[in-house]
Image (cartoon, rainbow, N blue to C red):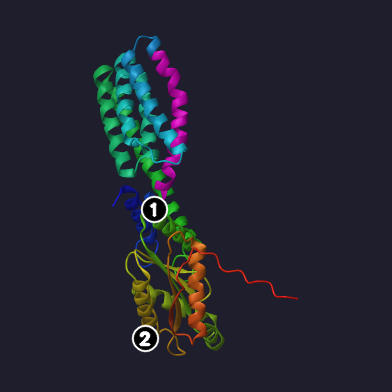
Amino acid sequence: MNDSMREDMREQARERSAFPWSAAPSGDDVMRAHRNRMFQWLALAIIVLLTPFGVNHFLQGRILVGLAVMGVIAVLAVNAIAIRRNREPPISPAVVFVPLAAAIWSAIVAQGVNAALWTYPSVLLAHYTLPRRVANIVSGILTGLFSALVFVYVAPDTAARIFATLLLTIIFANIFLGTVERLAGQLQALAIADPLTGTFNRRHMDTSLGRAVAIKDRHGTPASLLLLDIDHFKRINDAFGHATGDEVLKRVAATIAGSLRETDMLFRIGGEEFAVLLPETVQASALQAAEKLRATVAAADLSPKGPVTSSVGVAELGPGEDSHGVLKRCDDALYQAKTQGRNLVCAAAPFSTLPRPVQAAGRG
């Protein structure tokens, strides 16, 4: 299994955590998607601001400081260019703090306490570009290191003030980012969840199905889709009201979820229609899973009207097939299950890349 495939699987696992029957996605997971973008703009700003200082160090004969500053600029530039080209940064963002620390150290030794002021933006850079725990470790090392250096080269009272203010900067950064991450996690959960049942919504199904297509194209990993529709759901609403109907939908969603694997994803995509994405599943296994779901729903006590049955369509993602194609084939299979009497599971027609024959025009 290569790194790209592992990342795809980790991304799916993070998204599945939005289910109400498991933990909500952490803010740090949500922020991870934005760190590259933040790094790109921060890198550009730092390069513009640092370059004159680096040139000045060379002109003043401080060669080591100049080289350290240029090392920071080089690492930032390489990563920023990669991000601009939609690639992963080739150098870990944490690496930038090695030449950065060397530059600040050399500058403090050469110029005194004024150079220690660069520690403050460095601490903030760590918190905006690194995972929280790593950022705290890096910023803690920078704080302790440069406070001690100022203590040796300047004065104890100045070192104490620098240490205290850097510590407060770290605390404030954690408070601010903690609030942002918590709100980002809540917004992410709301954006991809169905408000009634707590399952994923239709929009997120489109995203997840598109990702399954990409994984299929890239790695050849199979995936199958189930479409499940509650039979005669309108009768429940008509007989008992919409409040009871909503409760039935929630019970059906919970019943389906209880029958799924940890890797499967459940979506509500219509009034009484659900979809289940089964990663790494061929159609034969998907048919077995669909029959299990149908039987489980039929056997559960979900409605005051009596047993609730469902019709299920099943389709495996074909080679080279897009998300619209597999969804259409699965929907056709669902329609077949409903027209054949409901409370059935039907498999979709095999995927074919051949164009459909065109009917010849009738003679006049």
Outermost front residue: 363
Question: Which is nearer the eye, 65 or 178?
Answer: 65
Question: Label 1 to label 2, Cα distance in Å?
Answer: 40 Å
Question: Which is nearer the eye, 168 or 25?
Answer: 25
Reply yes or no: does residue 92 show up in magenta: no
Q: Amino acid at mark 1?
A: Arg
Q: Earlier in the sequence, mark 1 or mark 2?
A: 1
Q: Is residue 247 visible?
A: no
Residue 327 image label:
none
Disc 1 is placed on an element classified as helix
How would you classify the magenta stretch by its main secondary structure? helix
The residue stretch that appears in magenta: 30-57
Q: Which residue is mark 1?
A: 218
Question: Which is nearer the eye, 159 or 65?
Answer: 65
Q: Is 318 rendered above or below residue 142?
A: below
Do the numbered discs 1 and 2 sit on residues whose CB atoms are within 8 Å? no
Residue at 40% from the left image edge and 85% from the top image edge: 298
What is the count of numbered marks?
A: 2
Disc 2 is placed on an element classified as helix
Position of residue 132 measured from the top left corner of the image (x, y, whole percent): 33, 44
Q: Is residue 285 visible?
A: yes
Residue at 32% from the left image edge and 52% from the top image edge: 6
Q: Look at the image and tell me in which quarter the C terminus lies.
A: bottom right
Residue at 49% from the left image edge and 59% from the top image edge: 191
Q: Is 182 rendered above or below residue 19?
A: above
Position of residue 175 measured from the top left corner of the image (x, y, whole percent): 38, 44
Residue at 44% from the left image edge and 21% from the top image edge: 51
Position of residue 188 measured from the top left corner of the image (x, y, whole percent): 45, 56
Q: Which residue is mark 2?
A: 299
Left or right: 209 in relation to 222: right
